[in-house]
Image (cartoon, rainbow, N blue to C red):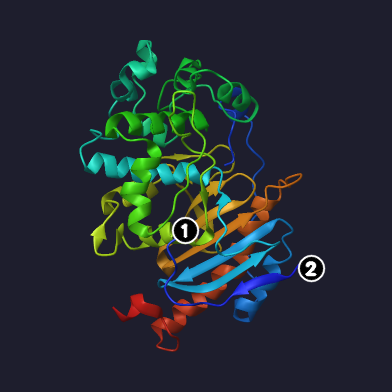
Amino acid sequence: MKRARLVRPVGVAGVGLMCAVATVAVLMTPWPRPLPVAPALDARLVTLDSVVTHAAELPRLTSLLVTQHGDRVLEAYYGGMTADRAVNVKSVSKTLLSPLVGIAIRDGRLRGVDQPVAEVLGPLGGALDDGKRGITLAHLLTMTAGLDGTSFGSYGAWVSSRNWVRYALEQPLVCEPGTCWSYSTGNTHLLSAALTRATGKSTLAYARDELFAPLGIALPPWDRDPQGIYLGGNNMRLRPRDLAAIGQLYLDGGRAGGRQIVPEEWIRASWRPQVTSPWNGYDYGYLWWSRELGGERVYFAWGYGGQFLFVVPRLDATIVATSSLQGRLERGQNRAVHRLVGRYVMPVLRQRWSGCEAGKAECGRRSAE
């Protein structure tokens, strides 16, 4: 068993998808569903030490960070990972575009989720037929644009093209917009392009100014397309503590440092299920996944190879897990992380929550407010 580098809780959390082939044929074939997450045989016996022990049994896990009531409950690192190291969070980057769209709508940069993407992109999107002109921002946010995908086997051809925006829009419609769910990084790249055009800033600059800098998070540059537009929905690099800070922002209704950073109503809309994924039965909102896990409703960002941010509103908690992308990736890593969270982390969080309500435990800054 590998050894964990455990960082003891030190107060308030520091600021800190898999891509699918979007074709009708693939969508008609359900993705292998994760194994059911069974509750621990005796939840009373689950402790923080047992969580760390079981986490260490996941060979690719590099970090596990748990917060509750705004305090770090557990912070452990594996395989040489450290607290100050940023990692590629893969398609967690998609979820991080969601608050940027909400902010842009609040500030009048975008008209609303029903605004056609062609209207926002203008000449950047090229000439579109009537069917594609009906694609809205909501369709992109919910992966229901209906365009054939630019992920998995199609990803290489897309990122090798001379114009990623137009290549994504030139893909055939496999269904009428809004009538099928087809996960594609091309959808989120169109959102990045829309943000760039609507705000007059690069996605990097807008994200730094409106979301990351107010939280004290350093967001480094990442990939750009041939036109200079930052890749929407992949390859951002962040620390686990950064992801926990985003989760805490959502728990706090979009407020941090006395400022309303993300509209609270946008958070509620983002978490509201819009469609159910045919891969796994999970619900999908505005670039957020949701499901029942370990007896709790969780909302989560999910990146290829086992990168996760879970938010558990009822327990006022966040859970971050990152995994190594080196070597041959194991398909079971995602299921293993879900099992770890459901069987071991959730019972600990419930124990702390119950103790807090009964006045038997230190409940952190939020319960004292």
Q: Quadrant of the N terminus?
A: bottom right
* Amino acid at dot 1: Asp
* Mark nearer the viewer, 2 or 1: 1
Can you see residue 246?
A: yes
Q: Quadrant of the C terminus?
A: bottom left
Disc sitting over residue 242 in the figure: 1
The image position of residue 289, as x and y in percent, is 48, 47
Q: Nearer the viewer, residue 96 or 179?
A: 96
- Is residue 29 placed above or below 288 in the rendered structure? above
The image position of residue 202, as x and y in percent, is 37, 35
The image position of residue 177, as x and y in percent, is 41, 24
Name the residue located 59 percent from the left edge and 28 percent from the top edge. 21
Q: Earlier in the sequence, mark 2 or mark 1?
A: 2
| Element carrying mark 1 | helix
* Amino acid at dot 2: Met
Quadrant housing residue 261: bottom left
Q: Nearer the viewer, residue 334 or 121?
A: 121
Q: Which residue is mark 2?
A: 1
- Is residue 109 placed above or below 258 in the rendered structure? above
In contact (CB < 8 Å): disc 2 and disc 1: no
The image position of residue 286, as x and y in percent, is 39, 42
| Element carrying mark 2 | loop
- Is residue 183 placed above or below 50 in the rendered structure? above
Q: Residue furthest right?
A: 1
* Few, some or many residues within 10 Å of mark 1 (<14, 14–19, 20+): many
Name the residue located 63 percent from the left edge and 35 percent from the top edge. 30
Count of all numbered marks drawn on residues in the image: 2
Q: CA distance from mark 2 to mark 1?
A: 28 Å
* Few, some or many residues within 10 Å of mark 2 (<14, 14–19, 20+): few
